[in-house]
Image (tube, coloured by chain):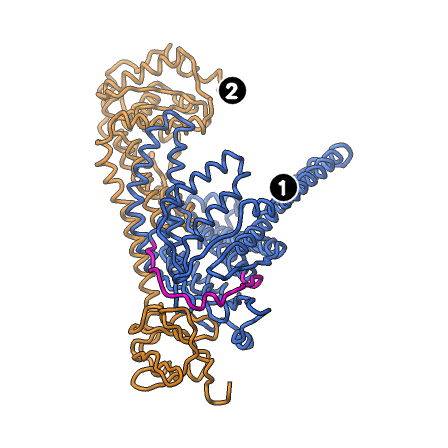
Chain colours: A orange, B blue
């Protein structure tokens, strides 16, 4: 290139109609004139000119007044400066800091709305949908969940005929007192964790350590009645629906962010534990009603819970707890308690049979 | 704002002179500065973190704009004209379509769960079919946003046909234990390239399944031999350790880790080498009008890049773990002075931890999630640098083009396609770059 004057090859023009490369000269008049020899190939008004990606060292321009893909590639620094001075809206379509802030703020707003939807909207929706789900579908869901239980606990089922019959009698007694008509199955699994849970469709699982730790039939019966409360309220189904809903919402948010799994897990733990506290309180109320109808006190259930979980009164922890604090629950169970007027829930022979259920399974005590 | 200052001034001069090898032979150029690309992806990754993922549409767009505009053929750079907003819209539309589909998939899956095992196979195939449909449309979108010399590339609409073909061939690959897969890859490339246009000029693909099979075969053999050799040597060492060495359990443990590491290393090297082979085969097969392409992409360069990525990912993990340990130590020391002032007996670290765990469960969970996501972001940036930017550099810089002059008279044709396919891939968790 000659000194001072930009050489012809410094400016390339593509007219957007064909891929031919035109070596052109520029004339700065009323508009930017793109000239080849004596002919003017195009005239671009300065305000219509926008910057596009030309790669390193190349200023690439387009014009809103020209065919969509018509381009002007400029390599000469002086010409670039002249154009930058003349085109007022050169960088109008570029993503600026202001736009970036807008994207960030809108994203945060969207994220907030999705999280709020997950916390408040999904449980509400689950409450509305659960009654509409036919029992047959609920049973299918329960079967799918039962397979997962089998995976987690293996085949460590405690299968003593006597104990099983006694436990079933107890469950049927409690269920009929609660007006529960759904078919019930009670399974005892060998485990060192004292716990019990109900699946959608009426399968109740009792872990052997819970039976070991129960001092009398009222304690075990209370926990069983609590789980029947979940069955009566179809809490398992509701939890499944809302878990599915939240998972879907959060995956919507994350798209293909690879680290999404951890975040989904954390947020779901937080969300679902907030939702289930109310369900637990309701199941407790159900258990209390059932026990009172049978003329038994509901206080042993409360003291049993406190004994199992210890005195928890740590502020931050309670947010993550799926069950309300035992102390809180004990108070609630004691509040409208009745005097013991009914017979024991099971006779002493049956109680011994239940306590002995897991003795044969490995490690059972 | 996209900056264009990512090139050393000296390189700009070279850029102005098109490298002409022999008459009619052109070497494309890739003139992107690696360091500034790394900052671009790091910044994008952090913004993506900050926006709970929503920034990804603009992030992807910025990466493509950078790679495209730094790639020039015959002295003129490609241009990516897609925008983040289009991707966002595509994603939203795709979600509207996918949401009921996922629901139906879920309910159907439950219903046929009772017949077990093979019952859900048709559903999986259906999802695969849908993914292939989306991938064709996504390619169509990307291609129609690719402009060279003021004329766009584009693709004919044939996504469903492609999806069915791809799914059928996928089943064939599975049935033949993957032996027929090279022919599947070749057939799909032919399908896509024959429907690809630059302006009015039709593209094509000359690569064959047999060609890919032939060039992958030596890799397969050398890989098998390497794995068997490692196995034999390690087994012999294990026997020797069992018989004579002192403390066999420790030496055996070291040997376990060593052989595991070696197996992983060999597998990664094989995969990287295969990528080089497949790229070479692909580039050599591409025809656009009278233009043909030739690739000399080096296997050892690909292997090097894969290992550089692995090493940097490992370094990131080690650095972050060290930082976390340091912070935890500080917290324990601080906690000890806070809860147990001097005078009372200071408890052991694990007691402080237990106390902390009970009091700060939520903050601890949140900060672990944050550290995890930060690690993922950093590793993502390393991935994009080594396995996208540097890999692309190797592919472009080892390429030669013959007969590019036949593309100088292409007439503009085709139109910009919608980003629905990209959104679907995103929703199906199959999004690429």
Image point (42%, 42%), residue name: B165
Residues rendered magenta in the picture: B396-419
Viewport quadrant of the N terminus of chain B? bottom left
Q: Position of residue A10 (x, y in %)?
A: 46, 80
Farthest-out residue, bottom: A4
Query: With respect to residue A90, does B48 lie above or below?
Result: above
Q: Position of residue B37 (x, y in %)?
A: 49, 64
Q: Nearer the viewer, residue A259 or A87?
A: A87
Q: Position of residue B27 (x, y in %)?
A: 55, 66
Q: Nearer the viewer, residue A81 or A65?
A: A65
Query: Is label 2 in contact with label 1 (beta carbons under 8 Å)?
Result: no
Q: Quadrant of residue A282?
A: top left
Q: Is residue B334 visible?
A: no
Q: Which residue is mark 2?
A: A362
Circle on res. A337? none
Left/right placement of residue A88 relative to residue B191 reads left
Farthest-out residue, right: B244
Query: With respect to residue B239, does B75 lie above or below?
Result: below
Provide the secondary structure element on which disc 2 rests.
loop
Q: Which residue is mark 1?
A: B260
Q: Position of residue B50 (x, y in %)?
A: 38, 58
Provide the secondary structure element on which disc 1 rests.
helix
| Badge 2: residue crowd in 10 Å (few <14, some 14–19, many ≥20) | few
| Badge 1: residue crowd in 10 Å (few <14, some 14–19, many ≥20) | few
Q: Is residue A347 visible?
A: yes
Q: Is residue B204 magenta?
A: no
Viewport quadrant of the C terminus of chain B? bottom left
């Amino acid at each position: 290139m000659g000194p001072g004057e930009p050489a012809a090859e410094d400016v390339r023009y593509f007219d957007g109609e064909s891929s031919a490369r035109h070596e052109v000269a520029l004339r700065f008049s009323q508009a930017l004139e793109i000239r080849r020899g004596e002919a003017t190939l195009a005239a671009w008004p300065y305000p219509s000119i926008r910057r596009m990606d030309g790669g390193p060292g190349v200023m690439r321009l387009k014009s809103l007044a020209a065919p969509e893909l018509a381009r002007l590639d400029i390599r000469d620094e002086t010409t670039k400066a002249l154009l930058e001075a003349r085109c007022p809206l050169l960088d109008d379509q570029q993503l600026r800091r202001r736009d970036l802030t807008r994207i960030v703020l809108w994203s945060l707003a969207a994220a907030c709305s999705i999280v709020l939807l997950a916390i408040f909207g999904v449980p509400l929706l689950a409450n509305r949908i659960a009654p509409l789900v036919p029992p047959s579908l609920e049973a299918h869901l329960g079967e799918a969940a039962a397979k997962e239980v089998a995976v987690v606990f293996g085949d460590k089922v405690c299968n003593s005929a006597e104990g099983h019959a006694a436990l079933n009698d107890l469950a049927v007694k409690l269920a009929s007192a609660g007006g529960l008509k759904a078919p019930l199955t009670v399974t005892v699994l060998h485990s060192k964790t004292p716990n019990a849970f109900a699946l959608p469709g009426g399968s109740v699982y009792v872990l052997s350590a819970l039976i070991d730790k129960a001092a009398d039939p009222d304690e075990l019966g209370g926990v069983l009645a609590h789980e029947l409360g979940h069955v009566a309220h179809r809490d398992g189904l509701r939890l499944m629906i809302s878990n599915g809903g939240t998972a879907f919402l959060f995956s919507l948010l994350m798209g293909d962010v690879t680290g999404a799994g951890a975040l989904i897990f954390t947020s779901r733990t937080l969300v679902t534990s907030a939702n289930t506290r109310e369900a637990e309180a309701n199941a407790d109320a159900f258990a209390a009603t059932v026990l009172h109808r049978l003329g038994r006190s509901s206080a042993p259930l409360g003291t049993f819970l406190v004994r199992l979980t210890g005195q928890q009164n740590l502020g931050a922890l309670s947010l993550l707890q799926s069950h309300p604090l035992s102390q809180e629950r004990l108070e609630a169970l004691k509040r409208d308690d009745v005097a013991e007027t009914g017979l024991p829930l099971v006779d002493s022979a049956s109680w011994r049979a239940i306590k002995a259920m897991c003795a044969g399974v490995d490690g059972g005590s | 704002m996209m900056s264009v200052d990512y090139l050393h001034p000296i390189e700009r001069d070279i850029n102005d002179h098109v490298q002409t090898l022999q008459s009619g032979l052109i070497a494309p150029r890739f003139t992107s500065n690696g360091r500034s690309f790394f900052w671009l992806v790091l910044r994008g990754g952090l913004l993506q973190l900050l926006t709970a993922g929503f920034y990804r549409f603009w992030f992807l767009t910025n990466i493509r704009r950078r790679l495209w505009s730094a790639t020039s053929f015959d002295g003129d750079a490609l241009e990516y004209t897609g925008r983040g907003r289009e991707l966002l819209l595509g994603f939203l539309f795709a979600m509207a379509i996918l949401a009921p589909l996922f629901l139906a998939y879920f309910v159907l899956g439950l219903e046929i769960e009772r017949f077990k095992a093979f019952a859900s196979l048709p559903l999986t195939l259906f999802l695969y079919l849908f993914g292939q449909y989306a991938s064709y449309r996504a390619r169509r979108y990307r291609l129609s946003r690719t402009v060279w010399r003021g004329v766009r590339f584009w693709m004919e609409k044939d996504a469903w046909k492609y999806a069915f073909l791809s799914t059928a061939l996928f089943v064939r690959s599975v049935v033949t234990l993957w032996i027929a897969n090279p022919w599947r890859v070749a057939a799909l490339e032919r399908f896509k390239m024959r429907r690809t246009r630059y302006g009015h000029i039709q593209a094509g693909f000359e690569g064959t399944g047999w060609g890919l099979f032939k060039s992958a075969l030596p890799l397969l053999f050398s890989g098998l031999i390497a794995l068997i050799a490692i196995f034999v040597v390690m087994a012999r060492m294990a026997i020797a350790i069992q018989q004579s060495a002192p403390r066999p359990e420790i030496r055996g443990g070291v040997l376990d880790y060593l052989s595991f590491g070696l197996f992983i290393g060999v597998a990664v090297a094989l995969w990287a080498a295969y990528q080089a082979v497949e790229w070479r085969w692909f580039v050599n097969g591409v025809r656009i009008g009278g233009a043909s392409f030739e690739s000399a992409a080096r296997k050892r360069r690909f292997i090097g890049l894969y290992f550089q990525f692995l090493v940097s990912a490992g370094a990131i993990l080690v650095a972050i773990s060290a930082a976390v340990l340091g912070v935890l130590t500080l917290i324990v020391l601080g906690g000890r002075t806070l809860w147990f002032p001097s005078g009372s007996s200071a408890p052991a670290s694990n007691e402080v931890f237990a106390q902390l765990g009970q009091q700060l469960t939520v903050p601890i969970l949140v900060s672990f999630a944050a550290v995890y996501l930060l690690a993922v972001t950093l590793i993502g940036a390393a991935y994009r640098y080594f396995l996208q930017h540097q890999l692309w550099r190797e592919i472009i810089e080892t390429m030669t083009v013959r007969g590019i002059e036949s593309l100088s008279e292409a007439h503009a044709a085709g139109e910009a396609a919608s980003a629905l396919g990209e959104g679907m891939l995103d929703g199906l968790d199959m999004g690429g770059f």
